[in-house]
Amino acid sequence: MQQKKRILLLATGGTIASRKSDNGLKPQITPEELIEYIPQVKEICDVEAVQLLNLDSTNMEPSHWKLMVHAIWEHYDDFDGFVIAHGTDTMAYTAAALSYMVQNTKKPIVITGAQKPIDLEITDAKSNLIDSFLYAADDRSQGVQIVFDGKVIAGTRAKKVRSKSYNAFSSIDYPSLAVIQDMNIMRYIPMLPYEEEVRFYEKLDENVFLMKLIPGIRPKVLKSIFENYDCIIVESFGVGGIPQSIAEEFYRLCQEHPDKLVVMATQVAHEGSDMTVYEVGHNMKEYCRFLESYDMTLESVIAKVMWMLGNYDISSCDIEEVFYHSINYDLIFGKNRKCN
Ligand SMILES: NC(=O)C[C@H](N)C(=O)O
């Protein structure tokens, strides 16, 4: 008989581990208690648990991603897979960050959580946890993924699209990798062929600013943003462009700060950017060295930039080569890539 897989549960808080307090829901349930709520997990795998953090994921920061990476690295040889219990609010950011920080992992890293605490009678926590352990213990699983409400979503493709319902996450511009129903995993997309060894990255540059455009935006704060951040991600409209109301100051600052990285992204949930389409995007090429998100999610763009700036010297490396290289399914239709 095949030996049971050993899976490490890293608990970080979130609604899944929350109880009511006088001031609202607050993470208080220990990882050992979480496991007690799902006794059937014993038939799937052997679980060990560590309480890594105890946060509402609203309070999750890049330093916490590093802590998760460190814990996985430290225990990598001792376990067959990892399940991270996490709040849903920033889960898509963590999943994206871990996709860049732990690459080529043949041991699955599964992130899950719940919209309702595990101690309530009506909760999605138990099924999400069971599905996650089932997926993490399956021989064919690898890489960083979110398992939630029966869907397996690539870590770079997830977005929280509902604040209350159980089907909180969508896979954006890419199919779910698999679905899980009645303890069966139905796989839609083959796992990536990892030829290289697993690689852990612990450095990030957190000096990244996301600037959301609104109609009538004024250039007042632009100078301070360019002076204080290493990268400005512009959350633009549609496929992308810079509005006339800030264009002059924006391009002036791009030229004054050639060392700053500018990334054009979009507020539109689906289908991504393409700065070549409209006149409003055209001037960027002339005045500024910029990257664009194409079909990457905003969460992935933010995490990828932090990872890239933390690990590469952008004054000497080919940033297009690094940024547009697809990692964990993050980019399909980017520059330099032919669709096949
Ligand atoms: N459903 C949840 O987990 C939401 C919670 N505020 C969190 O992200 O920690």
Image: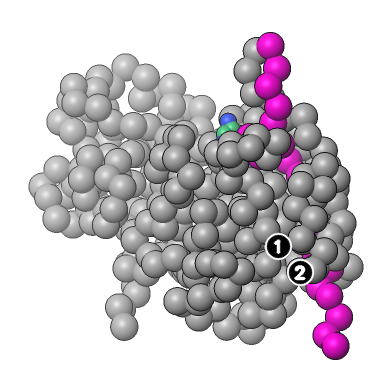
Contact between marks 1 and 2 (CB within 8 A): the answer is yes
Residue 12 on the magenta segment: yes
Quarter of the image with the N terminus in it:
bottom right
- Ligand 1 shown in quarter: top right
Q: Secondary structure at mark 1?
A: helix
- Closer to the camera: disc 1 or disc 2? 2
> Is 73 displayed left or right of 85 in the figure?
right
Q: Secondary structure at mark 2?
A: loop
Whole-percent x and y of residue 201?
70, 58
Q: CA distance from mark 1 to mark 2?
A: 7 Å
The amino acid sitting under disc 2 is Ile
- Depth check: 308 or 88 in front? 88
- Depth check: 11 or 297 in front? 11
For disc 2, the neighbor class at 10 Å (few under 14, some 14 to 19, many from 20) is: some
32 up-or-down from 224: above or below: below
Q: Write down the quadrant of residue 108 in the picture.
A: bottom right
Find disc 2 in the rendering and name its residue: 44
Q: Write down the quadrant of residue 236 in the picture.
A: top left
Numbered mark located on residue 133 in the image: 1
In the image as oriented, which residue stretches furthest toward the top?
22
Tell me the residue at 53%/67% (across/down).
Answer: 181
Whole-percent x and y of residue 45?
80, 68
